[in-house]
Amino acid sequence: MPPVLTLPLTGNAASRKPRDCGSQRAPVTYSVRGARAAMNAGRSSRRLARVPGLSADLHAAVRQSGLAKCSDLLTLTTLELVDRLDLYLEEVEDVLEAVAAAVAPQPRTALQLLQSKAAGPRPLRTGLPALDAHLGGGLRAGGVTEVVGPAGMGKTQLCLALAARALVDGSGSAARVLYVDNERSFQPARLVQLLRMLVSHGAPAVDPEELAARVCVVQPASWEEYEHCLPTLETEMLQQPASLIVVDSIAAPARAHFGRDRLMQRQDALAAQAGHMHVHACKHCACTST
């Protein structure tokens, strides 16, 4: 007879009947490793209370553990979760599988991708025919576009032009634009001028100033404020979705805050912010940063 390891149980686990270890468990559909890798893309910000597929008892155990987000749970090892959740190993595996299903990207067929692309929102035109043709019609909704170039090349002007185009093209659906102005370079008069130009050249007959009122401008005073800016914009997005998010710029405040001595910390911080932008872009809006 093989040796038996007996573990003293306390709390919730002591009062539950152990699962029949001889029963066959369903095959794991979602990879926990894939879920942990997905944290880099910002998917793990989902709250554990919203994860489907868990029984009431497992939801209660997660709630009592103090873990709030999927990322909080995925950063712990399986044995750490056994202790933290006060659950059996099999139950912890059930929790991990449910979280993986909610966080890890799900595979789709080529036909599904083609159909979703055809049914999705149209690309956002830049107003530059050659660039739009190169981009396949414009900036792709659901993606993040980075505009790079030396100072004075017109990156901010392009951002303003994109904001104006998003407002005019989405005027029928009351589209909004969220504009994060890190360098205090936002020019409201220039935006209204661009809106008037678009309206006068055959765009829908709308009031340019009414369109300008649909632009929400945020001007963080420091890198710390900017770090908390995109996550807190989720409330704005829930109240009324935006068709475009502009961050102008993300590189300059990062360089000013981290300097040249903390390059790795700067790259990690920029990657985290890119993850937040990708989460917002997945909600069918375009994100642009300089």
Image (cartoon, rainbow, N blue to C red):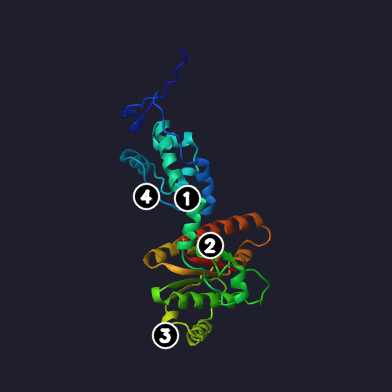
Q: CA distance from mark 1 to mark 3?
A: 41 Å
Q: Is residue 175 visible?
A: yes
Q: Position of residue 63 (x, y in %)?
A: 36, 44
Q: Residues within 10 Å of mark 1 (few under 14, many from 20)?
A: many
Q: Earlier in the sequence, mark 4 or mark 1?
A: 1
Evaluate if marks 4 and 3 touch, with contact meaning CB atoms under 8 Å apart: no
Q: Which residue is mark 4?
A: 50
Q: Which mark is residue 44?
A: 1
What is the CA distance from the residue labelled 1 to the residue labelled 2?
18 Å
Labels 4 and 1 touching (C-beta < 8 A):
no
Name the residue that disc number 2 marks.
143
Residue found at the far bottom of this picture:
200
Residue drawn at (50%, 57%) of the image: 114
Q: Nearer the viewer, mark 1 or mark 3?
A: 3
Which type of secondary structure does the marked residue at label 2 adopt?
loop
Estimate the spatial distance between the alpha carbons at disc 2 and disc 4, rounded to whole Å: 25 Å
Q: In the rendering, at what x and y percent does residue 150 appear?
A: 68, 72
